[in-house]
Each structure stands twice: as C-alpha cells, then as structure tokens.
Image: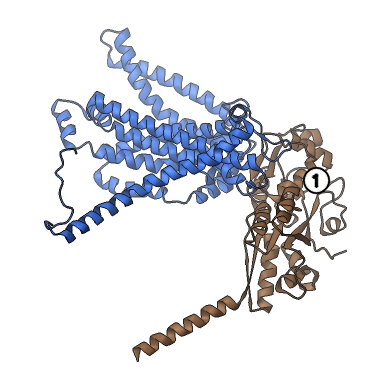
C-alpha cells in the first residue's frame, strides 16, 4: 500500500516535470532601458498565453547582444543599434540579427529645479561635457561651477549620448559616472550645480528638463523627431520570427493598442503615435 | 611540530588493514580539504594573469602606469590607469588614517579601560557593523551623506575639527606644557604650570577657531567625492580592526599586566609600554585586514565616489570625485567583451592583477613585520 502511494507520487511528479518542459520558454536579455518594456510585455503576454514562460534579464545592451550571439537568449533588448563588430560576429555565427523598434526614447538634459537656465543648445551641452564650459554663468546662469553627471560607459544611454551629443569628442575627466538612470536623477535632484541626462521616463518634478535647440523634450517632439537627442529602442531577434509564433507575437505587441499604452505608461514614446 | 609523534587519527589503536585504510582515507581527505583554498588562490592568480597579459602585449606597459587618460570607449581608445590607481590609493590612505586611530583607541578602551560588562555589550554591536551589506552603505553615502556634504559640508568639517582637536589639544598641552615648565623653571610651581598650560591651550584653540572659520566657508560642489567614500570605508573597516586588535590585546593575558603592576608601573604605563607592544603583531594584522577591506570594497565606491577618472586639482583636494580600480572593473565589465573589444576587456584583468599584487605585497609586509617583531621582542 505504501509502495503504491510512493509510486503514485513519483508518477505525478514526473508528469508535472513533463508539463513544465512542454511550456515554451522565451529568454530575453539586454538593456536596462528597454527592460521595463520587455517586462510589461512579458507580464501581459503570459497573462493571455498560459503555455509560455518568459524570463527577462537586464544586463546591458552589450550583454544582450552577447547573449543573442551565444544563443542564450531569443530576444535581445538594446537601447542602441548593434555595433559593426557585433553584427559581423553574429553573421559569422550564422545568426541574422533583425531589429524591431518597439518604442522611442528622448534623452532630456536635466538640471536642478533651482537652476534658472531653461534652454541650451546641443553645442553648449557638448562644450559643457568637453570641459570647455565649466561655470553656469558662461551659459547665462549663476556664478557656480558645473557638476557634470553621466551614465557609465557601459550603458546604452551613454553610447546614445556620446553619439548624438558628443560627436566623437571625449567627455572631460572631471565628469562623474553613475550606474543607472535613477542614480542620475537622484544625483541631480540633490545637487544644485549638476547637469545630467536620463531617459524620458525618468524625468519628474524633482528635476528640470531643459529645452535643447529650443525644443522641449515631450512625447510629441520625440516621436516626430524634432527633439535632437532622441533614439529608437530595439528588440533584436535571430532572423524575422516565424509568423504566428510566440516570438512573433511578442515583438509585435508594441503595435497593438495595449502595447502602446504600456510603452506610454512606462514613460517612453510609442512608435505609432504620430 | 617536528618531533610530534606520528599517531593514528582514529581513537582506538588500529592495527588491522581495514583500520589502516580508514585512517589513510581520513588523513588524505583532510589534506584535500585543506588544500582547496590554496588551489583556489593559485587558480585565481593564474586565470587573472592569463587574461591580463594580453593587454600588456597589445598596448605596452608604459601607457597603463603613466597616462591619466581613461577613455576605454573612445576612438582611439585610451587606457591610462594612473588616475584610477591614484584614486584607489587616495581613498585607501584616507580611510586608513581615519579608521586606525579610532579603532585602536576603542580596542584599547574595550579591553583595558571600560568595565567588562560594557565590553560584553559594545563589542557585539561593533561587530554588527561588519554585517551590514556594502550596498546599504553605498545607498546611505549616495542618498544621505552626499547631499549633506553639499549642503553643509563646511560646518560638518568644522564640527569634526572641534571634536578631534579639543581633546587632542588638551592632552598635548598638558604633556608638552609640563615638560616645558620643567625645562624653563627648575622647580615650577603649580601656578606656573597652570599658566603655561593655559597659554598653550589658548593658542591651539585660537588656531582651531581659525581653521574652523576657514572650513566653514568651504563649499563642496559635489557630495560624491573622495572624502565621502573615505569616511564610509573607514566606518566599514572599523569593526574588523577593533575586533581583531581587541582580541590580541585580550590575549596578552593577566600575568604580563600584573607583572607590570608589581614592578610599580601605573595603569597608563602598563598599557603603553607593556600591553600594546605585546599585542603589536595582532594589531598590525588587524590594520592590514582593515586596509584590505578598504582597497577591495567595490559597491560603495562605485555608488559614491563619482567615478571621475582624474587626479584631483590640486592632488590633495578630497572634495573632488575620483575613480577607483575596483569600481572600474565592476562598472566596465558588462560592455567589455573579449570578442568585440579586446584591449578593453583585458585592461580590466590587468587592473585586477595589479590589485592582487598590491594585496599580496601588503600581506607579505605584515608577515615580515610580525616576524621581525617576534625576533626583536620575543613576542
């Protein structure tokens, strides 16, 4: 009797293991900026498809590309396009990266709310980060030293800033580097002399976003491409996913009404909002 | 140890073959367990060196140690690490300077001055500091301490000057004043002694006041700087140094202390001339452990040092952000793939190797110090 009981239990266990294995697994890795979108999509998608298990990791755009190359993830979140080297390495491994633009992101330049400056040009921002402008009075502000804050060189946000603002120029040595968008905001909101940049979703009332080239970063100016420091956010797959497959449905969520609402709720700009 | 008798590890005497086999198995597995840590160290060194050497092959040695330009993502990339090494040295030195006197004084007072019941309560509490995860320290440094430094850094420094300066100056002017009075007057009266003491103390207090008013005007433009990190690292190193040196002070034992009292020494003389020298090697070991904690700490410096790869201007300016080796390794590892950017990947291992060599050397130095003091003092 006892043996029969044990047998039944082990049968049930084996059956449940096979059940778990029957579930389709999608692994997503990459940018910390795109991560929240992927997480919201995953939650939504797993809610309507019980047979899919999606895990989302956030280890940076570079690591996302790496994982896609190594085959350890099916979707790579990236806040920048693949670099030449990464693309080449992928193709050599027989992986064809296909980009899906899931949302747009602006990089507002943020300062402390007490700072009277409300507008800068891209040129001025570049000169501040090059160390050519070191005092707020040189751009029409109070006589105070500028404290530069940047994302770490590891982040896609940094690379976007480097590409769109610095234009191959090297950021001055005195610049402080922090590890996340949230940390940029917390440094700027507590430092009256600070200047920094962070994703549009991270700008709230505790910091002040500046107009750049006379254009204030809003959803509209970003999605129409008027705001000069804006970027698309990508999900990369290996080849275009098979129509109707789970991955196909996942990377097209942003085209649906729910997808757009999710993107907007997280603080980014939907691609379809013209 | 050499003339230790070779005995069976089993409790009962074993002569049968089975017992000898069991004995051999136990001994050899114990040997294996012991060698695990040794093997781990050897492998760590080997693998770090294996990934570090390609960097020096690719870029040469001189840039790494002499350039202060750290632009790993630039085109062309630059890998000058001097400023980062300087940053590591700076915070380590500063935190050691802050932590060691405080730690040794508190260890001495815990072991020899305060009542035993107080020690039983205070020591575990100090040891709890070591259990706080470093990310919590980092969060505190970034969110609370950095804004505080920015808003009222000058006043804070002024208060610290008074808190440290006043007791030290009292002690100083009492001792120096006494000595001075003895030299100038053959038999100084109580009044002259007091007068000299008051004059000296007055001068020092005036100096402290000047320093205070100068510091009060200092404005710190960025709170995430070398000072912030050093203070936090000092707090983090404290429990290690206090706990280990207190243990070694306790280990000195009653007999030495009572011997000293029996020879007519006062309590202070016993402490300074007998107990502390006897516990010296333990205290040095404690300090080295504390320094290692400060050098190797990553999370706090990554969050609160500002991570600016620069040598401050002027070099002793502790109010400027700096970058350390550990924070650079942690922060740059993600994007630095050996497939896509080789020098950028290997430079991090070169830094790790450098850190490893430094810690190896300081361990060696402490060993040497302990050996030397054993030879010279016999303890």
Can the viewer see residue A222 in this picture? yes
Query: Residue A241 lies in what quarter of the image?
Result: bottom right
Chain of the residue where label 1 is placed in the rendered structure: A
Give the drawing colour for chain A: brown
Q: Residue at x 37, y 21 (%)?
A: B173
Residue bearing the label numbered 1: A164
Q: Nearer the viewer, residue A79 or A6?
A: A6
**Quadrant for the C terminus of chain A in the image:** bottom right
In the rendered structure, the answer to whether residue B5 lies left or right of residue A273 reads left
Query: Residue B309 lies in what quarter of the image?
Result: top right
Q: Secondary structure at mark 1?
A: helix
Specify the farthest residue to the bottom: A1
Q: Is residue B336 above or below residue A266?
A: above
Residue A194 x %, y %? 70, 41
Q: Nearer the viewer, residue B154 or B104?
A: B104
Q: Callout 1: 10 Å neighbours few (<14), some, many (20+)?
A: some
In the rendered structure, the answer to whether residue A201 lies left or right of residue A4 reads right
Q: Is residue A106 above or below residue B74?
A: below
Residue B153 x %, y %? 57, 36
Q: Residue at x 76, y 53 (%)?
A: A81
Give the drawing colour for chain B: blue
Residue A127 x %, y %? 79, 35
- Badge count: 1
Q: Is residue B318 above or below residue A18?
A: above
């Amino acid at each position: 009797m006892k043996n029969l009981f044990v047998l039944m239990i082990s049968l049930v266990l084996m059956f449940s293991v096979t059940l778990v294995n029957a579930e389709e697994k999608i692994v997503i890795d990459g940018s910390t900026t795109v991560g929240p979108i992927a997480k919201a999509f995953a939650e939504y998608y797993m809610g309507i498809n019980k047979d899919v298990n999606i895990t989302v990791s956030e280890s940076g755009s570079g690591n996302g590309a790496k994982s896609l190359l190594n085959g350890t993830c099916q979707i790579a979140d990236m806040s920048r396009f693949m670099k030449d080297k990464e693309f080449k390495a992928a193709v050599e491994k027989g992986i064809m990266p296909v980009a899906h633009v899931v949302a747009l992101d602006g990089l507002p330049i943020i300062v402390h709310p007490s700072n009277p400056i409300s507008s800068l040009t891209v040129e001025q921002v570049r000169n501040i980060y090059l160390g050519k402008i070191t005092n707020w009075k040189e751009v029409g502000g109070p006589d105070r030293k500028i404290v530069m804050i940047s994302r770490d060189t590891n982040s896609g946000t940094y690379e976007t800033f480097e590409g769109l603002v610095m234009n191959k120029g090297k950021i001055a040595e005195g610049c402080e580097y922090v590890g996340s968008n949230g940390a940029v905001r917390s440094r700027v909101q507590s430092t009256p002399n600070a200047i920094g940049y962070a994703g549009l979703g991270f700008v709230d009332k505790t910091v002040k976003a500046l107009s750049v080239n006379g254009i204030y970063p809003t959803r509209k100016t970003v999605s129409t491409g008027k705001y000069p420091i804006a970027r698309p956010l990508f999900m990369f797959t290996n080849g275009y996913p098979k129509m109707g497959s789970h991955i196909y449905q996942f990377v097209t969520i942003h085209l649906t009404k729910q997808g757009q609402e999710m993107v907007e709720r997280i603080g980014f700009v939907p691609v379809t909002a013209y | 140890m050499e003339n230790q008798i070779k005995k069976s590890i089993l409790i009962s005497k074993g002569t049968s073959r089975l017992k000898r086999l069991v004995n051999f198995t136990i001994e050899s597995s114990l040997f294996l367990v012991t060698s695990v840590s040794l093997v781990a160290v050897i492998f760590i060194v080997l693998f770090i060196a294996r990934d570090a050497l390609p960097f020096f092959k690719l870029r040469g040695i001189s840039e790494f140690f002499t350039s202060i330009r750290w632009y790993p993502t630039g085109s062309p990339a630059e890998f000058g690490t001097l400023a980062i090494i300087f940053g590591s040295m700076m915070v380590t030195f500063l935190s050691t300077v802050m932590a060691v006197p405080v730690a040794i004084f508190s260890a001495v007072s815990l072991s020899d001055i305060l009542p035993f019941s107080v020690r039983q309560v205070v020591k575990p509490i100090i040891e709890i500091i070591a259990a706080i995860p470093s990310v919590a320290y980092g969060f505190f440094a970034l969110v609370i301490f950095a804004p505080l430094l920015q808003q009222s850094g000058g006043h804070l420094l002024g208060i610290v000057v008074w808190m440290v300066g006043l007791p030290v100056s009292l002690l100083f002017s009492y001792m120096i004043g006494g000595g001075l009075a003895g030299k100038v007057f053959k038999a100084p009266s109580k009044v002259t002694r007091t007068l000299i003491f008051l004059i000296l103390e007055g001068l020092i207090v005036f100096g402290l006041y000047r320093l205070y008013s100068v510091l009060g005007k200092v404005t710190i433009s960025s709170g995430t700087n070398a000072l912030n990190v050093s203070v936090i690292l000092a707090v983090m190193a404290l429990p290690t140094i206090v706990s280990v040196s207190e243990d070694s002070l306790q280990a000195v034992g009653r007999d030495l202390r009572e011997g000293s009292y029996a020879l007519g020494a006062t309590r202070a003389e016993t402490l300074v001339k007998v107990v502390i020298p006897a516990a010296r090697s333990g205290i040095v070991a404690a300090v080295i452990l504390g320094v290692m904690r400060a050098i190797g700490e990553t999370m706090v410096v990554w969050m609160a040092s500002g991570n600016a790869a620069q040598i401050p201007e002027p070099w002793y300016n502790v109010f400027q952000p700096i970058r350390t080796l550990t924070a650079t390794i942690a922060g740059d590892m993600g994007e630095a793939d050996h497939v896509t950017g080789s020098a950028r990947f290997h430079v991090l291992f070169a830094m790790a190797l450098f850190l490893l060599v430094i810690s190896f050397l300081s361990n060696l130095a402490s060993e040497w110090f302990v050996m030397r003091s054993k030879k010279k003092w016999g303890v």
